[in-house]
Amino acid sequence: MPDDINALNVAEEIAGRLLKERPELAGRHFSILVTNQDGEEVGRVSLDVLH
């Protein structure tokens, strides 16, 4: 992704699709970890917050 904000936005989109296709994942404390090219954490998108 061109920047951290864009990467986090894409992670939110992916999380939303995951929950739509696999609603049983909600409430199980799963997150999508977003890292930069150096492997440093940029942020996390919790599947619990989206449902």
Image (cartoon, helix red, strand yellow):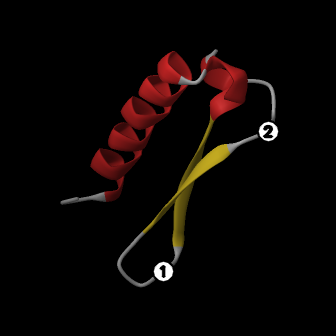
Mark 2 surroundings: few (<14), some (14-19) or many (≥20) residues within 10 A = few
Looking at the rendered image, the disc whose residue lies closer to the viewer, 1 or 2, is 2
The residue located at (41%, 46%) in the rendering is 8
Rendered position, 40 above or below 15: below
Say which residue label 1 marks: 39
- Specify whether 51 is left or right of 29: left
Quadrant of the image occupied by residue 2:
bottom left
Q: Are marks 1 and 2 in contact (CB under 8 Å)?
A: no
Question: Toward the viewer: 38 or 20?
Answer: 20
Say which residue label 2 marks: 29
Q: Position of residue 32 (x, y in %)?
A: 56, 49
Q: Which mark is residue 23?
A: none
Q: CA distance from mark 1 to mark 2?
A: 22 Å
* Secondary structure type for disc 2: loop
The residue located at (71%, 22%) in the rendering is 24
Q: Amino acid at mark 1?
A: Gly
Rendered position, 26 above or below 2: above
Q: Amino acid at mark 2?
A: His
